Amino acid sequence: MPTAIVLINAESGAENDIFEKLKTIPQVSEVYIVYGVYDLVAKVEADSMDSLKEVISSTIRRIPKVKSTLTMIVMENRSYVRK
């Protein structure tokens, strides 16, 4: 399953609005408001690479008050989560 991590810069004070919109996108499996260079981080999963690109470019990047994004395509769906 094609997966990407999307780093998002928001207009000042718009983090919560963008967070709520990201939660409604079915392909967004995780979303976090973070401190640092970026304001939000979203994990996006889709059935195909074309679908993944479409969600990022036509949906996420067009959310009002999203200033910019940086997309990292996952090369291997191998992960580690400490619980």
Image: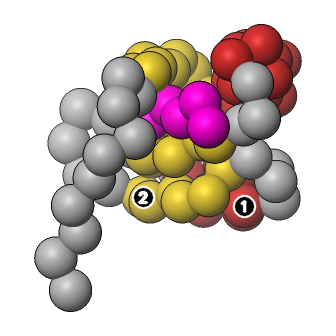
| Amino acid tagged 2 | Ile
Left or right: 17 as drawn, with respect to 77: right
Question: Which residue is painted at 62% across and 58% down in the image?
Answer: 29
Count of labels in the image: 2
Residue stretch in magenta = 1-5
In this view, 33 is above or below 63? below
Give how far across and how far down residue 28 sits, in percent. Answer: 67, 50
Quadrant where the C terminus is found in the figure: bottom left
In this view, 48 is above or below 20? above
Most common secondary structure along the magenta stretch = strand
Give how far across and how far down residue 7 sits, in percent. Answer: 42, 32
Under circle 1, the secondary element is: helix
Question: Which residue is painted at 31% across and 46% down in the image?
Answer: 78
Question: Is residue 70 rendered magenta in the image?
Answer: no
Under circle 2, the secondary element is: strand
Left or right: 62 as drawn, with respect to 66: right
| Amino acid tagged 1 | Lys
Observer-side mark, 2 or 1, equals: 1
**Nearer to me, 21 or 55:** 55
CA gap, disc 2 and disc 1: 12 Å
Q: Residues within 10 Å of mark 1 (few under 14, many from 20)?
A: some
Instruction: Decide if residue 25 is in sight here.
Output: yes
Question: Which residue in the structure is indicated by mark 2?
Answer: 33
Q: Residues within 10 Å of mark 2 (few under 14, many from 20)?
A: some
**Nearer to me, 67 or 42:** 42
In this view, 81 is above or below 79? below
Instruction: Decide if residue 7 is in sight here.
Output: no
Give how far across and how far down residue 40 sits, in percent. Answer: 44, 46
Question: Is residue 2 rendered magenta in the image?
Answer: yes
Question: Which residue in the structure is indicated by mark 1?
Answer: 23
Question: Which residue is painted at 72% across and 61% down in the image?
Answer: 23
